[in-house]
Amino acid sequence: MLHSIEDDDHKSNEGFDLNIGGKNVKKQAPKGGKQQLHSQSQIFKYAYGQIEKEKAQQNKNLTFSGVISMATDHDIRTRPMIEIHFKDLTLTLKRNNKHLLRCVTGKLSPGRVSAVMGPSGAGKTTFLSALTGKTAAGCAVTGLILVNGKNEPIQAYRKIIGYVPQDDIVHGNLTVEENLRFSARCRLSADLPKPDKVLVIERVIESLGLQAVRDSLVGTVEKRGISGGQKKRVNVGLEMVMEPSLLILDEPTTGLDSSSSQLLLRALRREALEGVNICMVLHQPSSTLFKMFDDLILLAKGGLVAYLGPVKKLEEYFSSIGINVPDRVNPPDHLIDILEGIEKPASVTREQLPVCWMLHNGYPVPADMLDLTEGLSIASGSNPNTSGGGAGDQSFVTDMPEDSKSSVSKSKDLSNRTTPGILRQYRYFLGRVLKQRLREGQMQAVDLMILLLAGACLGILVKVTDETLDSTGYTFTVIAVSLLSMIAALRTYSLDKLEYKRETEAGISSLAHFLAKDTIDMFNVIIKPVAYLSMFYFFNNPRSSFQDNYVILMCLVYCVTGIAYVLAIAVAPSLAQLWAALVPVVLTLIANQGKDSTVQKYFGKFCYTKWALEAFVITNAERYSGVWLLTRCRSLESGGYSLNDSSLCLIVLVVYGVVARIVAFIILVTR
């Protein structure tokens, strides 16, 4: 990546250990302005220089308490704040009215790192999905969610919200840095200077400990790349580079060892110091890792809250209801064992823990849970959600902002961030897709070799017959080229559906994504007819010219590529391959039924194979003259062709290709 940077630049940056600290980039900008930094070397020197200055401002032996004290430093650049309030948040399956999440009340505050824990099936991921509006179809969400005290949809802030999925959805045929750079380019503010964007990327790479693998391919299932832990950190880094105000993470430490988990959490704490609201799902962290969180949301079976408040008050609350954490036992481990039913305290049952929390905070208890209150004598005590530890009857309702009943904005973008437009994102996508295709050069070469082989075989086996104007050879040509081109084009969308979904949910343009892929696929539209005809034309030697055959095949490949887009996007990969094999064969059989056939009469004009075959026959027939005129007329009449329709056939093929692409794009954005 840094090939243009001098060797002394590498030496000056060895030993980076950027653990913490969001900085005021603009305050340290060069006097001449960042617009004067043109070369890559200058940009990276500036970025590394800023990081060195930031490190110099920190104490080498900075303790954890010292890190927290940096939150009041006036040099720290804060981001737009997002505070989430939620009251009686409930998610129910419509088909059986089963509660996946129930009566969840609380808030997520800026500048704090919150952990969501609980036993398996407690609704941890469901809780994050409900907050971010990513609930699946068939679920009903009730309750109130306020963003910055206003009743507004969370999607209105999606440009400044980062969501890290549980699975590592990363482009495997790109390097670590290329993945991060693309996300930063498309999601950071469009008016942010390039040196600042590079600085953001370098900070994330440094804080996540990815320096050693920055130029390594992430890897796929077939091709080994970086380790699983490094891939997990890249997955998180894709959201960190866009400088979010709200960062949601679904099990980011799964698969990481203790040191890697602490490295990740230190990087997230640095984000919190800049005012980022961070919430993540965890499975029983170590005691050291657990103490690094500010707040805890502990969910019980059925999606009910067993505790929601500061980590430092966790043991105090559970002691008040008769549950004491044994010495040398990690508190979350002990509490989750109780919620799972492994440990059984004498004072309360695991089913009563959510009711204890409701009574403790003065929340209403659902009617079907009133029988669980028997035997409980929970006095309304100090509410962990209040900073001053006021009276027990001070619940979340009293903390609700006054303007919480404002009208809901359905389409207005409230993120106050202008990301790059479609044309600029198209340029970014174009560069990314081109790199991916070049790295798949072996697969592209195999596709061309198969076309060469198919052209040679058909050219040798199918002989030119003047009586039929070589329609048999062209029939097999249409089938072979359609089949091979269509199967190859399926890879354009079948392999990265999850990556596309993640990017489009983050606000990246679907149109730029589609147009860039289609533009790169034009290479196949141009080169594949040459590969096929170079063999077929040599061995078959038809009367029509090479140029005429090339134009027809180019229109044919353009048409079937669009049809392949529809299949790849609309159905599963296995079914798409089956359809790609059936469609050319079936449509070619329909096209060869003859003009008197009922099938040909009603469906022939809708078959692209009919127009391609007609174009080939007409182009060949134009070369017959003299004594062959009678044979030419008879062959054209039997197929229902006309010499005047040559241009019409090409136009229809192109129109079919355009219509197929429009349909594919509509399916892409509506699925």
Image: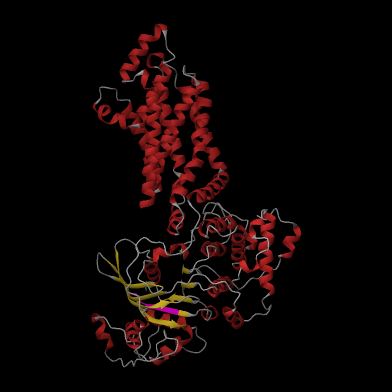
Relative height, residue 166 to residue 56 (above, below): above
**Residue 496, relative to residue 283: is it above or below?**
above
Q: Nearer the viewer, residue 88 or 122?
A: 88
Q: Which residues are magenta?
A: 296-303
Q: Quadrant of residue 193?
A: bottom right
| Tally of marks | 0
**Does residue 657 appear anywhere in the picture?**
yes
Relative to residue 586, is residue 125 depicted above or below?
below
Q: Outermost residue, top direction?
A: 627
Look at the magenta stretch and give its main secondary structure: strand
Can you tell which quarter of the image residue 608 is in? top left
177 relative position to 642: left or right: right
Nearer to the camera, 217 or 244: 244
Position of residue 97 in the picture relative to residue 383 (left or right): left
Nearer-the-camera pick, 406 or 313: 406
How far across and down, in percent of the image, does residue 615 sit? Answer: 40, 24
- State the image coordinates of residue 85 (x, y, percent, origin top left): 38, 75
Q: Is residue 250 visible?
A: no
Residue 87 image offset from top left, x and y in percent: 34, 77
Left or right: residue 191 versus residue 159 is right
Q: Residue furthest right?
A: 8
Check residue 229 for magenta coloring. Answer: no
Residue at x 36%, y 36% (from the top left corner): 583
- Quadrant into which the N terminus falls: bottom right
